[in-house]
Image: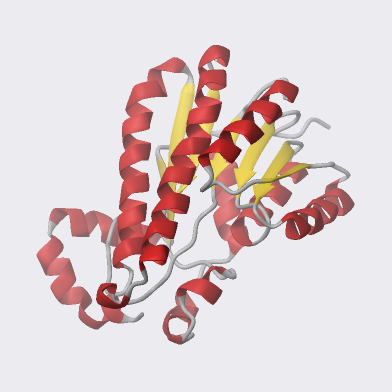
Amino acid sequence: MKKSLDGKHVIITGASGGLGAQIAMDCAKRGAIPVLLARRAEQLDTVAHLIQNHTNTIPITIKLDVTDRSEVKHVFQQLLKNLPSVDVLINNAGFGVFEEFHEAKWNSVEGMFQTNVLGLMACTQEVLPVMLRQGRGHIINIASQAGKISTAKSTVYAASKHAVLGFTNGLRMEVGDRGIAVTSVNPGPIATDFFTIADTSGNYVKNVARYMLKPETVSHEIMKAIEKPVREINLPRWMGIGSRLYQLMPSVVEKIGGKAFKQK
């Protein structure tokens, strides 16, 4: 029986665990061939074996550090030579560090922008010419609700995700009438190992535990968007409503939010 993503090639960065690994699994279950990219080669192999065992699909795995522009160019040039088509690019690689800005280490500041913003742009720039020649394709950028509402101790992380949203919205206008869909995914906190770096104290995770999204939930919405492209995905939905209200009356929302915006 034909599956919804049969034969499609889906490139996923940050695919060695968490949301990226879940997306790869769900794509394979729907008949796609996932292309897994990440810095951690051993974890990539583990994810690939799990996918093969559960779906009989053999993913393509390539070690890639998205912060290395020359490596991105080389990897994608070699990859794109061997793919019959590029259907979807999911820019998922990213990390955050939650701390007050006056205490922020500069290598963390640069690292977040190198990975979350410039790495995302670099990968996108490599696949866009192919998609434009094809006259079709889909770019999905994993942003964050932090890209809509910044909060205390996420100043740099939120700034990087604001940049992702600005880039995504502008790119959509550039290529939307040329057969290429562009989607931003704006989740709240997801129960993954993201917080082993972002929240070393564990306090934030304790404070928002009941609001944590499951990777399966976010991936399910992404699968729906691949099958039927949408402008953006906001999860959980009540956070999406909150971010819209914030755009309309930021000072009121900040006042009402109060302690909720300082849970880190």
Give percent across and percent down for residue 208: 43, 79
Q: Does residue 228 lie above or below 204 as drawn? A: above
* Image coordinates for residue 206, horizontal then vertical, percent: 47, 86
In the image, what residue occupies the spot 30% across and 57% down?
159
Give the residue at x 63% y 62%: 18
Q: Quadrant of the N terminus?
A: top right
3 left or right, relative to 196: right
Q: Residue at x 62, y 28 (%)?
A: 87
Above or below 190: residue 230: above
Report the coloring of the rendering. Answer: secondary structure
Q: Quadrant of the C terminus?
A: bottom left
Quarter of the image for residue 152 reads bottom left
Residue 219 visible here: yes
Name the spot of residue 45 as percent of width and height, x first.
80, 54
Relative to the observer, which residue lies in front, 71 or 169? 71
Query: Residue drawn 84% across and 41% down?
Result: 57
Q: Position of residue 29 (x, y in %)?
A: 76, 45
